[in-house]
Image: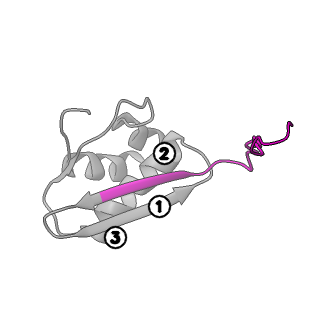
Amino acid sequence: MEPGKTWCEDYEYERHGVCNVFLACEPLVGTRVTMTAPQRTKKEWAEFVRRLAEEHYPTADKIVLVLDNLNTHTLAALYEVFPVAQARRLCQRQQQATRA
């Protein structure tokens, strides 16, 4: 500090944990579906896809997913998490678009 100089103070970022937010949006209709999870694992992603398919779009023939390149975003994750019959039903309704 010197006379005539302004006070400068830096801050330290203190991390208090993390949270993952899954988001599905349908811009032409104006809807959003979100789900928070403590981590970003295949299990959480598969549960989000299940909720989309069974709770939010139960009558849709196809659901188009535009995904990023995360290793957890695969249809194989559905088979790792759910029984084979349920995973097959979910996969038959999913159409993965080009990954962003």
Mark 3 vs mark 1, foreground winner is: 1
Say what secondary structure mark 2 lies in: helix
Residue for point 26% across, 45% down: 91
Q: Is residue 13 magenta?
A: yes
For label 1, the crowd category at 10 Å Cα-Cα, with few meaning under 14, some 14 to 19 and many 20 or more, is some
Instruction: State the CA–CA distance, disc 2 to disc 1.
Output: 17 Å
- First in sequence, mark 2 or 1: give its number: 1
**Mark 3 — residue?**
55
In the rendered view of the protein, which quadrant contains the N terminus? top right
What numbered label is drawn on residue 81? 2
Residue for point 31% across, 66% down: 32
Question: Residue 36 appears at what percent x and percent y?
Answer: 53, 59
Residue for point 85% across, 36% down: 2
Q: Quadrant of residue 96?
A: top left
Q: Which residues are magenta?
A: 1-24
Mark 2 vs mark 1, foreground winner is: 1
Identify the main secondary structure in magenta: loop
In the rendered image of this protein, does residue 5 appear above or below residue 34?
above
69 left or right, relative to 39: left
For label 3, the crowd category at 10 Å Cα-Cα, with few meaning under 14, some 14 to 19 and many 20 or more, is few
Question: Residue 46 appears at what percent x and percent y?
Answer: 43, 48
Camera-nearest residue between 11 and 34: 11
Say what secondary structure mark 3 lies in: helix
- First in sequence, mark 3 or 2: give its number: 3
Instruction: State the CA–CA distance, disc 3 to disc 1.
Output: 13 Å
Question: Residue 34 appears at what percent x and percent y?
Answer: 42, 62
What numbered label is drawn on residue 35? 1
- First in sequence, mark 3 or 1: give its number: 1
For label 2, the crowd category at 10 Å Cα-Cα, with few meaning under 14, some 14 to 19 and many 20 or more, is some
Say what secondary structure mark 1 lies in: strand
In the rendered view of the protein, which quadrant contains the C terminus? top left
Camera-nearest residue between 48 and 75: 48
